[in-house]
Image (spheres, helix red, strand yellow):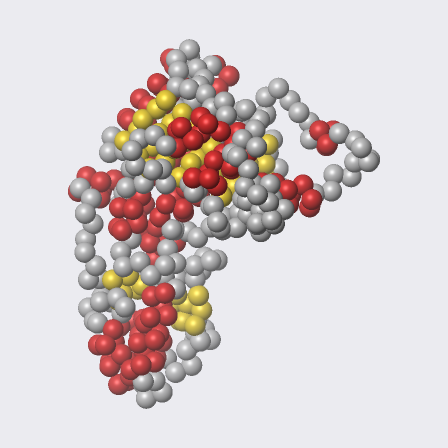
Amino acid sequence: MLSRPRVKPEHAPYRTAAGNVRIGSVIFGIGAEIEDPHGWVWDLTQAMDGTRTPLDLAELVAAAHDVVTPADVLRAVEDLSRAGHLEDAAAPGPTLPEEEQERYGRGVPLLRWMDRNATPSAWRLQERLRSARVLLIGIGGTGGYAAQALVASGVGHLHCVDPDDVELSNLNRQPLYREKDIGRPKTEAAREDLAALNSAVDVTVEHRSVDGPSDLKDLLGRGGAPYDLLLLCADRPARIRRWANRVCLETGVPWADGGYHGPLVSVGLHVPGKGGCWECVRLGEVERRDLGLPEGADESAASPVMPWNPVNAVTAGLSGLLMAHVALCLLTGVASVEPGARYGINLAALDDVAVERYPRRDDCPACGRATERRAPGG
């Protein structure tokens, strides 16, 4: 129970024409409507200004409304807290330095607005982010936007891995690089850009390729403290997602992969032990789709294979920012996203919201209950 509950500013309630109480704004997934025929729920929300204890509130509202008891009011306070509409005016203040409080002062209210947990103070979420460690592989278009967003948001430590040098053809969608960087290792230029963006974040880089599951295990095992999350923003070699899935299942590290396929941008979130793994989702999608091809025809006929995936700053940016968003969700617990799923946006038809969600499969070769666990490279 909160010591001195108050309604979050972003969740300020109002009364509808029907006399109900709407709280949490009118945004889907956050707001709620409460029937209030006797008016005591409204009076309760108005009294929760951070100056009263729950017992004070219970006595005040019950004294004004004989249709409820103090116990009823206490249950209502607890329900509103569990639904994420309240914070604690008595919660300790932020422990971050004043400069960081000013830097993140616009982002913390957004976390508070989206938080559907019983969190006493949104600054706890920012402090949680500050202690997080993220491994990011591939700092091209998707990875570059994701890295910038995470560093700007205040992730504590970000380690970036990439084997390539900057080329002129990168500059239409890779925000970390400039014309002066052509020919330089991407890691070198990225470190400079990210350090200039937020010196409070520990950014490290590594100029190397990932050629097999052993490389991923080596990267995840480095640096003393374990990583909280792997962000896979590379699409080469072709089997790298399968390697990441097997290694993360073995090590227990949550991971996300993202990218673009023409106008479709998407991100998948995978948490070992929660929902289907990457291979479960992939198998489910293969079974679901109907390409309409004649029997025995090559599936590539339905999806043109080109030397380079068509992309611009918008498709790369959206995929990278979606990656950063699910990373922040996983690291802070806000907002809630379901693992074992892939979320996408179709830029050719914005009303086509793509969601692929599949349960864990008994026959999955990576995590299936009926299948003996194979080695990460199997």
Instruction: Decide: is 38 above or below 299.
Output: below
Instruction: Decide: is 144 above or below 104.
Output: above
User: Which of the pair 33/265 is nearer the observer?
Assistant: 265
Quick one: which residue is furthest to the front in this view? 372
Please tell me in which quadrant of the rendered image residue 179 appears: top left
User: Which of the pair 99/71 is nearer the observer?
Assistant: 71
Residue 152, given in percent of the width and then of the height, sits at 32, 36
Picture residue at 45% right of the left edge, 17% below the top? 164
Instruction: Decide: is 11 above or below 344.
Output: below
Instruction: Decide: is 181 above or below 375.
Output: above
Judge left or right: residue 306 versus residue 377. right
Quick one: which residue is furthest to the bottom in this view? 66
Quick one: which residue is furthest to the top in this view? 183
Residue 14, given in percent of the width and then of the height, sits at 38, 68
Picture residue at 26% right of the left edge, 50% below the top? 123
Q: Quadrant of the N terminus?
A: bottom left
Q: Does residue 317 show up?
A: no
User: Which of the pair 352/80 is nearer the observer?
Assistant: 80
Picture residue at 22% right of the left edge, 62% below the top? 89
Picture residue at 59% right of the left edge, 21% below the top? 308
Q: Quadrant of the C terminus?
A: top right
Residue 269, given in percent of the width and then of the height, sits at 49, 43
Q: Does residue 114 show up?
A: yes
Judge left or right: residue 63 versus residue 146. left
Quick one: which residue is furthest to the right in this view? 294
Residue 154, given in percent of the width and then of the height, sits at 30, 38
Please tell me in which quadrant of the rendered image residue 30 appears: bottom left
User: Which of the pair 348/278 is nearer the observer?
Assistant: 278
Please tell me in which quadrant of the rendered image residue 158 appears: top left
Judge left or right: residue 89 versus residue 142. left
